[in-house]
Amino acid sequence: MNIDKQVAYWKDSASSNIETAEILLNKDKYTEGLFFCHLAIEKILKAHYVKHNNALAPKSHKLQYLAEQSSIELTETQKDFFSVLMQYQIEGRYPDFYPPYPTHQTAIKLLDDTKQTMIWLIQKL
């Protein structure tokens, strides 16, 4: 397995997903956009997992789990943020679960938080 190639795949895919999130949120597709915010963070964490563990990323969507398995220490604020994003990935996969519908202001704040978290995680790669 080529670790650098795997890391680049996850990193590039995460960057694409954050762009998609922004497009969706700008079109007032809040739950869909936040699903892609979650996906972007999930994928950059998978890049960390691959690099840290020298193994393929697990088929998990749990952000805190992926961070823990990659030895990334999160602040309580980051853990809370990941918990919020987790609500929107569940709704995207399981239609019986409905998270609170975000306001425009909340969705944009979560997008900004996602972008900042992505920058932080990319710097740590």
Image (tube, grey):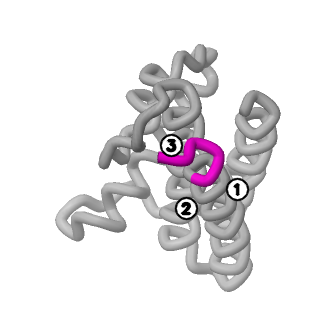
Q: Identify the mark nearer the N-term, 2 or 3.
A: 2
Note whether 70 is above or below 39 in the view shown. above
Residue at 36 percent across and 47 percent down: it is 61
- Tell which residue pokes out farthest to the front in this image: 1
Circle 1 packing at 10 Å, graded few (<14), some (14-19), many (20+), is many
Note whether 34 is above or below 121 in the view shown. below
Q: Nearer the viewer, residue 53 or 64?
A: 53
Amino acid under label 3?
Lys
Indicate the quadrant where residue 30 lies: bottom right
Amino acid under label 1?
Leu
Please count the marks in the image: 3
Residue of label 1: 111
Indicate the quadrant where residue 103 lies: bottom right
What is the chief secondary structure element of the magenta stretch? helix
Indicate the position of residue 42 as horizontal and vertical percent values: 50, 47
Discs 2/3, front: 3
Note whether 58 is above or below 67 in the view shown. below
Residue at 75 percent across and 28 percent down: it is 124
Indicate the position of residue 91 as horizontal and vertical percent values: 33, 62
> Is 69 placed left or right of 19 in the picture?
left
Is 106 inside the magenta-drawn segment? Answer: no
Residue at 61 percent across and 27 percent down: it is 78
Indicate the quadrant where residue 25 lies: bottom right
SS for tag 2? helix
Circle 3 packing at 10 Å, graded few (<14), some (14-19), many (20+), is many
Give the magenta part as a residue range: 1-5
For the residues labelled 1 and 3, the Cα–Cα distance comes to 19 Å
Residue of label 3: 46
- Tell which residue pokes out farthest to the bottom in this image: 27
Residue of label 2: 34
SS for tag 3? helix
> Is 18 placed left or right of 116 in the picture?
left
